[in-house]
Image: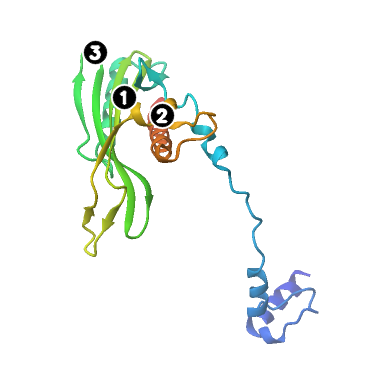
Amino acid sequence: MKQKVLFFIMVAMTMPGAVHAQNDGWVVVNEDTQEEVAKVKAPKVRKQTREESDAPYLKGKVPEVDGIVTFTHEYDVPGKTAQELYELTYKLVSAMTKEDGQINSRISLKNDNEHSFAARFNEWMVFSEHLLAVDRTEFHYSMVVLCEDGHITLGMNHLSYLYSDGKTYKMEDWKEIKLGGGSAYTAEEWITDKEAINKKGTKLLRFNRKFRISTIDRMNDIFERFNEALTTSEQ
């Protein structure tokens, strides 16, 4: 049987015109059959409603401490000294301040004795991007890292946005120019539950929506970056 199949394949490769459907179910693939395959459509995926897509970003996802938007996360790292965790996180954050999209971000304060440091991040938050235009805002926030034996506390606050007209146009030489005036917003007046969620609590308000979603996603991304670095260090 194997010899028969091998012989048939050899014939099919050298003389495709001689192979017909009668040969054990084999069919010559030509433009007609390829067109038939192309007509087979993938099943349609139901598009999420506005309420469904907003659900992960509703009440409680932007925490406040004494009226100040503050994202915090605690990490238990058994077996690691405060000094080891300080060196690891300092290196991680220093690298983050130099990544693409950063605008003069830097570690601004440190205390070697207390194994703690603070950084100020100024970065681009991109909402959408197309060939000739990008909708984005400058996103500013402070980060504080406190290290103890076997434990890290990470916090972000003083969040704010500097938003132009929402579009940065790219010229032929790819230099960018901004059009329109700028508007500054603090997280407290723009992305809190009170300011960004409708009265029914079912969806985000249209103008605040992209800011709140992107901010929550960015904070979660930073938390995960720390988690990955600490998990890797334990291996």
Name which of mark 1 and mark 3 comes first in the sequence.
Answer: 3
Check disc 2 and report its element: helix, strand or loop. helix
What amino acid is at disc 2?
A: Glu
Residue contact between numbered discs 3 and 2, judged by CB atoms under 8 Å: no
Q: Mark 1 points at which residue?
A: 157
Q: In this view, does 31 lie above or below 99?
A: below
Looking at the rendered structure, the kind of residue marked 3 is Glu
Image quadrant assignment for residue 5: bottom right
Q: Distance between the residues labelled 2 and 1?
A: 17 Å
Q: Nearer the viewer, residue 37 or 87?
A: 37
Where does label 3 land, which residue?
114
Give the CA separation, mark 1 to mark 3.
20 Å
Contact, mark 2 vs mark 1 (Cβ under 8 Å): no
Q: Percent from the top left, x then y, of residue 168?
A: 28, 52
Q: Which residue is drawn at 28% across and 44% down?
A: 101
Q: With 194 as the anchor, is 201 left or right in this view?
A: right
Numbered tag placed on residue 195 in the rendering:
2
- Locate residue 37: give its quadrant: bottom right
Q: Residue at x 66, y 77 (%)?
A: 29
Mark 3 neighbour density, 10 Å: few (under 14) some (14–19) many (20 or more) = few
Which is nearer the eye, 70 or 204? 204
For badge 1, the amino acid type reads Asn
The number of callouts visible is: 3
For the point 67% across and 83% down, the residue is 16
Distance from label 3 to label 2 (Cα)?
37 Å
Asked whether the beta carbons under mark 1 and mark 3 sit within 8 Å of each other, the answer is no
- Frontmost of labels 1 and 3 is 1
